[in-house]
């Protein structure tokens, strides 16, 4: 991607929405190009890869953890990560709170809920979401800040289905916003469907291949 196409992508993303450049599998040099054009939010899905890149890049990058996160890796993130998008269990919440306490730094997270029809997609059911939200307001996670919800739509050409799934995530948030006013962010939309996600209220689009080209893995 050239600077010009990067700028035209930014124009398609409305002011209420932030672009997270998904840099997984991409080289440090490619990330530096985007950084030089002004991009500061980058997303990675593997902790080891993220740690390897971070030290070679400017410290004002905001790193987003977007992939499935194992509890034993949480300790590597709490010192510096800007936002963990993929929190999908109470166990993971407990671990993040524990490690954030050690790091003496509040950790911001999104709660990943299941919106896709297919079984393979991660994310929790609404019962677990509501249990976490209740525990959070009961102050069981004093070192965590919940910022909103994240969801991944079914991988399909059926745009109607994807639209429904994004709308469902938005309703999940809207239904809870009075009780839990901190649920401001909606992380949804990737290369193929970000325009629709923005129409459905996305505040963070996670875009990889459209920026960096197709990945090998
Ligand atoms: C890889 C990935 C993306 C970006 O996908 P593209 O289709 O390349 O834009 C977004 N979100 C998550 C969780 C990912 O793992």
Image: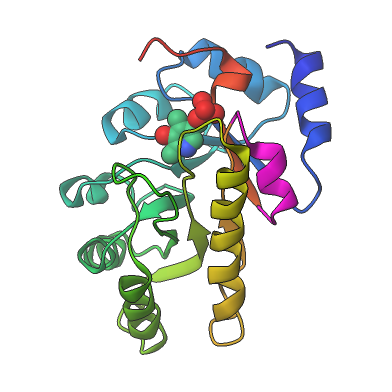
Residue 34 lies in what quarter of the image?
top right
User: Compared with residue 167, is residue 143 higher up or lower down, i.e. above or below?
Assistant: below
User: Compared with residue 51, is residue 17 higher up or lower down, i.e. above or below?
Assistant: below
Question: Left or right: 21 with respect to 105?
Answer: right
Looking at this view, is 115 or 76 the one in front?
A: 115
- Residue 115 at x, y percent in the picture: 45, 55
User: Compared with residue 60, is residue 138 higher up or lower down, i.e. above or below?
Assistant: below
Look at the image and give the residue range highlighted in magenta. 191-202
Q: In this figure, which colouring scheme has been used for the structure?
A: rainbow
Looking at this view, is 201 or 46 the one in front?
A: 201
- Residue 15 at x, y percent in the picture: 81, 49
- Residue 55 at x, y percent in the picture: 40, 27
Looking at this view, is 175 or 64 the one in front?
A: 175
* Image quarter (top left, top right, bottom left or bottom right) of the C terminus: top left
Question: Left or right: 70 with respect to 39?
Answer: left
User: Compared with residue 7, is residue 67 higher up or lower down, i.e. above or below?
Assistant: below
Which residue is rendered at x = 32% and y = 48% of the image? 122
Which residue is rendered at x = 65% and y = 52% of the image? 202
Looking at this view, is 62 or 4 the one in front?
A: 4
* Image quarter (top left, top right, bottom left or bottom right) of the N terminus: top right
């Amino acid at each position: 991607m050239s600077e010009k196409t990067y700028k035209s992508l930014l124009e398609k993303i409305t002011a209420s929405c932030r672009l997270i450049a998904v840099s997984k599998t991409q080289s440090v040099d490619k990330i530096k190009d985007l950084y030089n054009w002004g991009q500061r939010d980058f997303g990675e899905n593997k902790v080891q890869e993220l740690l390897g890149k971070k030290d070679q890049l400017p410290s004002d990058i905001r790193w987003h953890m977007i992939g499935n996160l194992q509890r034993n890796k949480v300790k590597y993130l709490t010192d510096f990560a800007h936002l963990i998008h993929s929190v999908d269990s109470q166990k993971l919440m407990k671990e993040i709170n524990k490690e954030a306490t050690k790091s003496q730094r509040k950790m911001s997270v999104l709660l990943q809920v299941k919106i896709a029809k297919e079984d393979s997609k991660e994310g929790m059911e609404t019962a677990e979401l509501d249990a976490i939200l209740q525990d959070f307001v009961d102050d069981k996670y004093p070192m965590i800040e919940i910022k909103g919800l994240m969801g991944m739509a079914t991988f399909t050409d059926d745009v109607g289905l994807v639209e429904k799934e994004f709308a469902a995530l938005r309703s999940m948030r809207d239904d809870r916003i009075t009780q839990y006013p901190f649920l401001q962010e909606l992380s949804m939309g990737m290369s193929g469907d970000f325009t629709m996600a923005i129409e459905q209220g996305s505040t963070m689009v996670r875009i990889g291949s459209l920026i960096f080209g197709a990945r090998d893995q």
